[in-house]
């Protein structure tokens, strides 16, 4: 059975569409667990009154995406766990496709959905997550035609927006890092999975429609994201690769700093780096465990990291400036670039 875990924070109106799409799945062998992350809009009461068969976990405060997802995973009964954003609508065959993928690919432990932009369904939101040698992640296919991504492929990882995991993987690498609170926690999980020898596969038939940037965690998301990227790199990058790629990582930090200065974000960027450095002693303990249990060679990891980071950096900036998707012209594309680490 698949357990679908949906974290939500003040997203009752968005959640209606998501749950309605799950109600018409062609496969019925799944459970739904909604984790209400300290909402003030009556989400938990509404779910219990209108969807009594859905398990609703109510947290007393907003503990962030990672903590909410972990609570859902711990309460799940399925052998497999699917994560889903509350601002999504899934295709009626989404669960069936994921179940078929589990059977057809017993060697794969992480499955990435084909996530399309809800307001522009001919465009990709993400076809899996990528990660560069410069230490930033990106959405594969962001804003490109959906028709360009019709075939399965091995990817660095799966976006937490719509992903499926074999539950046994969590027993090996642990759950999401709750110190991240929100942003890049799925990249961190993907890197830990890669270190432990687990593989991620993009499934183009697993269709999900995402209302991009409809939800966000409260607080300084810009600072949180860049802090988390520093922690992610320090925790997961083997020493040999960390030394090899250090010039690229530093170059990217400088480029982000220049861009932050131009956008008026330099103070927040400096604060994010300070937060990151302050947390490194705690991350050092986690790094020891991750690197001690690493099961793959440096060469295997290098194959999953994208070396063309300057090209990716430029493409993401260009997509933000020249976005031709009407629903994203209001600045969502530029905000997405920030969350892609540039």
Image: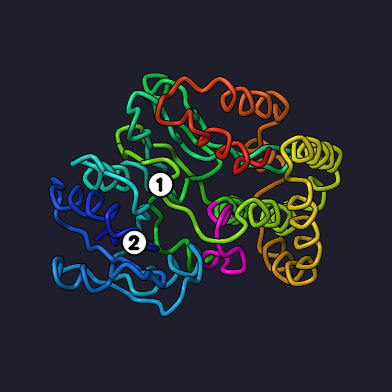
Q: Residue at x 60, y 56 (%)?
A: 192
The numbered dot on residue 214 is: 1
Q: Position of residue 163 (x, y in %)?
A: 40, 49
In the picture, residue 134 is in which quadrant?
Answer: top right
In the image, the segment drawn in magenta is 173-186
Residue 294 coordinates in the image, percent (x, y): 66, 58
Give the CA distance from mark 1 to mark 2.
18 Å
- Closest to the observer: 3 or 274? 274
Quadrant holding the C terminus: top right
In percent of the image, x 64 and y 52: which residue is there?
Answer: 225
Residue 51 as seen in the image, left or right of residue 301? left
Question: What quarter of the picture does the N terminus occupy?
Answer: bottom left
- What residue did someone put label 2 on? 5
**Image: 209 above or below 185:** above
* Residue at 39% from the left image edge and 57% from the top image edge: 166
Position above or below: 70 against 116: below
* Tag in front: 1 or 2: 1
Please tell me which residue lies in front, 137 or 325: 325
Above/below status of 310 relative to 233: above
Residue 288: x %, y % from top left: 74, 67
The residue at 50%/36% (across/down) is 332
Q: Is residue 179 magenta?
A: yes
Mark positioned earlier in the residue sequence (1 or 2): 2
Residue 150 placement: quadrant:
top left
Mark 2 is surrounded, within 10 Å at the Cα level, by few (under 14), some (14 to 19) or many (20 or more) other residues, namely many
Classify residue 321 by image quadrant: top right
Along the line of sight, the residue nearer the viewer: 292 or 220 = 220
Q: Secondary structure at mark 2?
A: strand
Q: Where's residue 13, x and y in %?
A: 27, 55
Q: Is residue 254 left or right of residue 167?
A: right
């Amino acid at each position: 059975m698949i357990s679908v875990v949906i974290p939500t924070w003040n997203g009752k109106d968005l959640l209606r569409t998501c749950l309605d799409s799950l109600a018409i799945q062609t496969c019925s062998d799944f459970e739904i667990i909604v984790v209400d992350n300290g909402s003030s809009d009556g989400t938990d009461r509404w779910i219990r009154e209108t969807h009594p068969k859905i398990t609703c976990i109510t947290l007393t405060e907003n503990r962030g995406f990672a903590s909410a997802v972990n609570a859902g995973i711990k309460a799940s009964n399925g052998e497999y766990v699917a994560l889903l954003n509350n601002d999504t609508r899934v295709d009626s065959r989404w669960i069936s496709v994921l179940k078929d993928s589990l059977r057809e690919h017993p060697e794969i432990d992480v499955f990435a959905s084909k996530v399309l932009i809800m307001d522009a369904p001919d465009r990709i939101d993400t076809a899996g997550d990528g990660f560069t040698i410069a230490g930033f992640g990106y959405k594969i296919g962001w804003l490109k035609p959906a028709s360009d991504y019709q075939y399965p492929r091995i990817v660095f990882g799966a976006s937490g927006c719509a992903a499926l995991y074999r539950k046994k993987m969590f027993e090996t690498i642990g759950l999401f890092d709750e110190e991240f609170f929100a942003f890049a926690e799925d990249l961190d999980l993907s890197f830990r999975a890669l270190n432990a020898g687990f593989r991620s596969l993009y499934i183009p038939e697993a269709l999900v429609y995402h209302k991009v940037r409809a939800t966000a965690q409260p607080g300084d998301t810009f600072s949180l994201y860049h802090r988390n990227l520093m922690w992610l790199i320090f925790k997961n990058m083997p020493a040999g690769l960390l030394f090899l790629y250090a010039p690229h990582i530093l170059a990217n930090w400088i480029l982000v700093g220049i861009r932050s200065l131009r956008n008026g974000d330099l103070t927040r960027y400096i604060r994010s780096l300070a937060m990151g450095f302050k947390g490194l002693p705690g991350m050092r303990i986690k790094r020891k465990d991750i690197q001690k249990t690493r099961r793959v060679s440096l060469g295997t990891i290098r194959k999953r990291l994208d070396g063309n980071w300057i090209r990716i950096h430029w493409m993401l900036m260009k997509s933000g400036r020249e976005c031709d998707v009407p629903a994203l012209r209001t600045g969502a594309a530029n905000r997405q670039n920030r969350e892609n680490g540039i």
